[in-house]
Amino acid sequence: MTDFERKLLVWANSFTHCTYLNPNDFGDIYPQKPFKKLLAVGAKKIVNFSEIPENNLPKNSFQQLKKHHDNNQNWLFGYFAYDLKNELEKLESNNVDALDFADIYFYEPEYLLIFDENSNKNTEFELITEKNITKENLLKEIETYYQDFYQENYQEIQQKNSPKPSNINIQARITQEKYIQTIQKLKAHIFKGDIYEVNFCMEFFAENVALNPLEAYFLLNELSPMPFSAYQKINDNYVVCASPERFLKKIGNKIISQPIKGTAKRGNTPQEDEIIKQNLLNNPKERSENIMIVDLVRNDLARSAKVGTVCVDELLGLYTFKQLHQLISTVSAQVTDNKEFTKIIQNAFPMGSMTGAPKIKAMQIIENEEVTRRGLYSGALGYIMPSGDFDFNVMIRSILYNSQNQYLSFQVGSAITADADPQQEYEECLLKSQAIRNVLAKL
């Protein structure tokens, strides 16, 4: 991360709201392009999701989001938490939730910086704001803030917000033994025919943590740069995200989803790395996981698509990141004319890669077997444009932090199929969490 990006985020972090979407130069590598590079700062308007529905109808946050967008036609940044599923289906979430994030949150920024993806200069961006300030004066303001406040107080800030490693006592919400027992129960559901795949997740957490979330993001992005990386601050709630996965993108009348299923560690040498890649690509279990979820995503997109337009653009694409290898598939469709953008999201939410199939039955089983409410984890974070186009990631490989109650959480999961080996699934979860563990050990 460049010095300029650090200065930008230090300035942005002084506001109550900020969202940084960082594609990490994956523009020519990731299929269908990664996130736009965007920085949203300050909250000009916050979407009101507390309205009471008329005529005793069930609450519909998606409809309230559409109403706000229709009336304002501005950029929106925010997230959908996994537990919004309860508004879409007859489902519930009764497990432990110490983070206490809202189920949905969107805001219009005071400042929006849209970076030029065709330029190598970080300072090349379009500024959108109603403030009476030029781009040049904003850059001066950012530099002044960084020099006058941050550098002078850096040591004090570090001492206050960054505990010694021993102070971050990471605990598992369930034991390894309990995890393995649960996987056996899930496989029993599969053998009975209740489901044929399910994504099971577990939480790691720490209490009484005085974290510096921005420093955590700088470090995580260095260790694990990803195409759907994000840093978000909403009052006392922070997201430090290194996601490799796209949930759903709309551009014009085209929608794109890119489920990831299939994970392997990096090798210690180029030769070992190549062997691991080929083993992943040819692993029957990993391939079947991916193909099952591709089929589910095809069905989800078909609910919004013109007949005959759902297409698998790429099946089982093998992509390499700094920490691991992944199998990524790309599914696209042409949406029907005048389809509401919120309905498109609603028809595919939550994403199949984090639930299982059949989706509703899998979510019922997840609620019974997991012990932590997922909240924002396995939800989606991103933006909505004035046109109604949007792009959202899958909220995985992320640190979630509530600074008010000093609670830190990260969850990991894997797809369970009939031939899943419980011990290997547990080890895959540890692999996915390794970058986060390394970050927390260094702060």
Image (cartoon, rainbow, N blue to C red):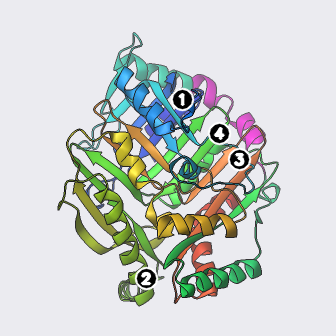
**Location of residue 6 in the rendering, given as x and y in whole percent from the top left corner:** 50, 39
> In the image, which residues are magenta?
146-163
Spatial CA span between label 4 and label 3? 8 Å
Was residue 415 drawn as part of the magenta stretch in this picture?
Answer: no
- Report whether 296 appears left or right of 242: left
- Provide the residue designation for mark 4: 237
Residue 375: which disc? none
Would you place residue 136 above or below residue 324 in this image?
above
Q: In which quarter of the view is residue 169 placed?
A: bottom right
Of marks 2 and 4, which one's residue comes earlier in the chain?
Answer: 4
- Provide the residue designation for mark 3: 99
Which is more foreground, mark 3 or mark 1? 1
- Provide the residue designation for mark 2: 286
Question: Which residue is situated farthest in the front direction here?
Answer: 55
Q: Amino acid at mark 1?
A: Asn
Q: Residue at x 39, y 76 (%)?
A: 292
Question: Which residue is situated farthest in the top direction here?
Answer: 132
Q: Residue at x 30, y 33 (%)?
A: 124
Q: In which quarter of the view is residue 16 placed?
A: top right
